[in-house]
Image (cartoon, rainbow, N blue to C red):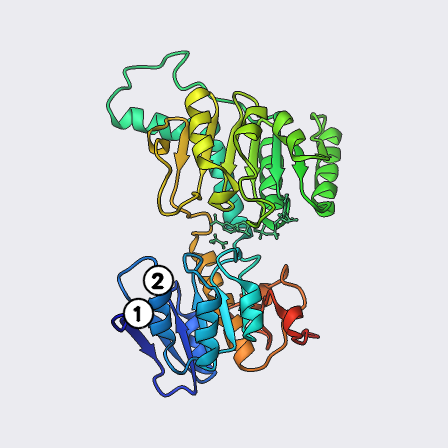
Amino acid sequence: MAKPVSIEVWNPNGKYRVVSTKPMPGTRWINLLVLQDCRVEICTEKKTILSVEDIIALIGNKCDGVIGQLTEDWGETLFSALSKAGGKAFSNMAVGYNNVDVNAATKYGVAVGNTPGVLTETTAELAASLSLAASRRIVEADGFMRAGLYDGWLPHLFVGNLLKGQTVGVIGAGRIGSAYARMMIEGFKMNLIYYDLYQATRLEKFVTAYGQFLKASGEQPVTWKRASSMDEVLQVADVISLHPILDKTTYHLINKERLSKMKKEAILINCSRGPVVDEEALVEHLKQNPMFRVGLDVFEDEPYMKPGLADMQNAIVVPHIASASKWTREGMATLAALNVLGKIKGYPTWSNPNAVDPFLDEKSPPPSACPSIVNAKALGLPVSKL
Ligand SMILES: NC(=O)C1=CN([C@@H]2O[C@H](COP(=O)(O)OP(=O)(O)OC[C@H]3O[C@@H](n4cnc5c(N)ncnc54)[C@H](O)[C@@H]3O)[C@@H](O)[C@H]2O)C=CC1
Ligand SMILES: O=C(O)C(=O)CO
């Protein structure tokens, strides 16, 4: 770091120094930290992505914990700097933590938090929005209107796909993948095929029960299938949505060969992480297959798009906004702050990171626990009995 970064300070005389690398939505997260004797320093630098050097400067000589962002490279260098400054806690303001070297954090005794659950429905809603926008060509049609090209109703104007009765394919049927699947099944009566390393039992039960309900109402029941391979999903589904974590096993999960297995008129949605898709291969596929459509919230080299993608009419692109609802972003800030606070105060970790609601209830104080620490086991941290 060359020069000091600009900061805003809350509770200057607080005992514990907590740094947030970005201003975050809402004030509850600040109040919770201040109430527990933290001096909160928020980086207000007008630079979207902070470098490792910027963050080292923010950490300084004494820092108890940091709340960071998914755009930052939290590896050996930063965890070593944080540990030298006496820090024992870091939390991403995100559920995904592929930007964090968890082993390095563990080596330096730093707990790594993330923010599961609070963004499940919001993210799934964006995936559903992109699915609808792509199937009904909403963005193309909007551009056509604004360009003054509409001169009357035509039988062939922006004809898209009907979702009802088609098959939705989910790759990675965890929290978000399952929530998305439910929206598409319940909302549009699509059948489900999914691929995950684990069985999505609750999702399967839901589809079975919903299918029975539809049948009892005299309607066509919906069905589900757990695919034995990802390729089966690609071959069968009309709309495919990607929701796995990003790791070595999911890097370029969708590549040239896999794209070629999908239906020519399929829709591919990605609200997981950009590198899950080989974006260059995708651009080529979009060029060769004009009826194939994609809805992308994430990109391989964010904030950039691969050459040619922005020119494709059959692609809808939005800037990583899947979790961007007010309630969710405020909740993410709260969970991230409570992860850091909990570790500083020596609280145990919450027993179930899939059930973090008690931390989000603004009317009552949060439990004395860290909502979600991903290396809790490796660090031997106690588990909350609450
Ligand atoms: N675009 C955005 O703004 C957002 C993106 N995300 C991304 O979504 C990801 C998923 O989040 P959650 O659903 O909360 O996580 P989760 O852990 O509940 O679900 C991930 C699922 O992926 C599955 N999986 C892992 N490796 C796989 C593989 N090789 N093949 C197939 N499935 C595999 C897991 O078994 C799990 O069921 C996050 O890790 C993050 O990267 C999450 C929130 C917002
Ligand atoms: O939480 C995440 O992983 C995101 O991508 C932003 O919500």
User: Where is residue 22 shown, x and y percent of the image?
Assistant: 36, 65
Front one among 134 and 258: 258
Left or right of 170, for residue 65: left
What numbered label is drawn on residue 51? 2
Q: Give the answer, above or below, for where 382 lies relative to 188.
A: below
- Expressed as whole percent of the image width and height from the top left, the position of residue 62 reads 41, 83
Q: In the image, is 146 to the left or to the right of 284?
A: left
Q: Eyeballing the image, is 136 above or below 199?
A: above
The residue located at (48%, 71%) in the rendering is: 79
Residue 200, x across and y down, in percent:
71, 45
Marks 2 and 1 close (CB-CB < 8 Å): yes
Residue type, numbered disc 1: Met
Q: For mark 2, does the 10 Å Cα neighbourhood hold few (<14), some (14 to 19), or many (20 or more) residues? A: some
Q: Residue at x 55, y 77 (%)?
A: 343
The residue carrying pointer 1 sits among few (fewer than 14), some (14 to 19) or many (20 or more) residues within 10 Å by Cα, namely few
In the image, what residue type sits under mark 2? Ser
| Residue occupying the far top of the picture | 155
Q: Position of residue 314 (x, y in %)?
A: 41, 26
Name the residue at 36% across, 75% down.
Answer: 41
- Inter-mark Cα distance, 2 to 1: 8 Å
The residue beneath circle 1 is 1
The quarter of the picture where the N terminus appears is bottom left
Residue beneath the point at 26% across and 28% down:
146
Disc 2 secondary structure class: loop
Say which of 103 and 144 sits in front.
103
